[in-house]
Amino acid sequence: QVRLVESGGGSVQAGGSLKLSCTASGGTTSTLCMGWFRQNSDKEREGVAAIDQYDVEKYATSVEGRFTIAKDDAKNTLYLEMNNLKPEDTAEYYCAAGFCAPFGGIVYFFESGAYKYRGQGTQVTVSS
């Protein structure tokens, strides 16, 4: 059983930055497909960014160029660097992990939310 714990959420003004962290236990980030998803007040889930065991990355179009996903396998930690935040980025962000097939499995993981484990989430609020 993989346990994921997020940290780093908060409130910022538009244009500001935040960095989220997700520490995994019970599993190793080097073998997992990992990603960040968010859920807004309407409870719509959206994939934000993902990275697979081959370090292939995928981003939502809405965050490309502003957000960067990274992981430190030595620390078993996943990060999401968020810059130039916008009010529409306001949501609960959660870390998720699963197993991705090679050659495109990350796409299914990202677009279908096909994760096996998820964290509790951390709130990000961006004010205008």
Image (spheres, rainbow, N blue to C red):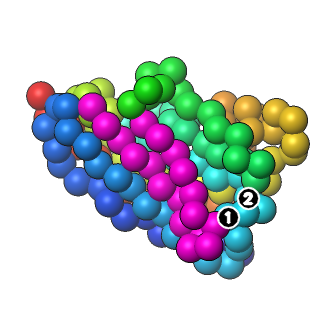
At 57% from the left and 57% from the top, the residue drawn is 71
Q: Is residue 13 left or right of residue 76?
A: left
Q: CA distance from mark 2 to mark 1?
A: 5 Å
Residue type at mark 1: give it. Answer: Thr
The residue under label 1 is: 29
- Classified by dominant secondary structure, the portion drawn in magenta counts as strand
> Which image quarter holds the C terminus?
top left
Mark 2 near mark 1, Cβ–Cβ under 8 Å? yes
Residue type at mark 2: give it. Answer: Leu
The residue under label 2 is: 32
Residue 83 is labelled as none
Classify 10 Å Cα crowding around label 2: few (below 14), some (14-19), many (20 and above): some
The magenta span reads 67-84
At 81% from the left and 38% from the top, the residue drawn is 105
Q: Is residue 57 left or right of residue 85?
A: right
* Residue 98 locus on image (x, y percent): 73, 55
At 43% from the left and 61% from the top, the residue drawn is 21
Q: Foreground residue, 80 or 89?
A: 80
Q: Is residue 128 magenta?
A: no
Q: In the picture, residue 67 is in which quadrant?
A: top left
Task: Name the element at disc 1.
Answer: helix
| In the depicted structure, whether residue 75 falls above or below residue 124 | below
Report the residue that reaches farthest toward the top: 61
